[in-house]
């Protein structure tokens, strides 16, 4: 996954989680907050959901 796509996904996640602090639930208020602060949130969500789960190797295995 490119750094650009990773940053787009990270920004979506942060805005989504912050919107839940305001709305407290996945409801129309959450959607309104997301629409206001990240108008392209649905495209970013779809990119994130379409990304492979194993795109990065996060293991700390140095071959030891």
Image: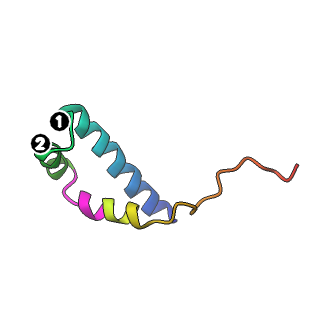
Which residue is under mark 2?
29
Report the disc number at residue 46.
none
In the visual, does 19 lie left or right of 50?
left
Towards the viewer: 6 or 50: 50
Residue 4, given in percent of the width and then of the height, sits at: 44, 62
The picture quadrant where one finds residue 19 is: top left
- At 19% across and 33% down in the image, what residue appears? 22
- Decide which of tag 2 and tag 1 comes sooner along the chain: 1
**Residue contact at pointers 2 and 1, CB within 8 angstroms:** yes
Q: Secondary structure at mark 1?
A: helix
Above or below — where is 10 with respect to 55?
above
In the visual, does 45 lie left or right of 24?
right
Residue 30, given in percent of the width and then of the height, sits at: 17, 43
Q: Tell me if mark 1 has few (under 14), some (14-19) or many (20+) residues whose alpha carbon lies within 10 angstroms of its own.
A: some
Q: Secondary structure at mark 2?
A: helix
Above or below — where is 35 with respect to 2?
above
Magenta span includes 24: no
Range covered by the magenta-colored residues = 38-44
Residue 17, given in percent of the width and then of the height, sits at: 31, 40
- At 56% across and 63% down in the image, what residue appears? 55
Which residue is under mark 1?
23
In the visual, does 58 lie left or right of 22?
right
């Amino acid at each position: 996954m490119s750094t650009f796509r990773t940053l787009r996904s990270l920004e979506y996640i942060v805005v989504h989680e912050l919107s839940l602090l305001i709305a407290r639930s996945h409801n129309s208020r959450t959607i309104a907050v997301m629409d206001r602060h990240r108008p392209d949130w649905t495209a970013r969500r779809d990119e994130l959901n379409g990304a492979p789960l194993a795109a990065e190797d996060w293991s700390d295995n140095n071959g030891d």
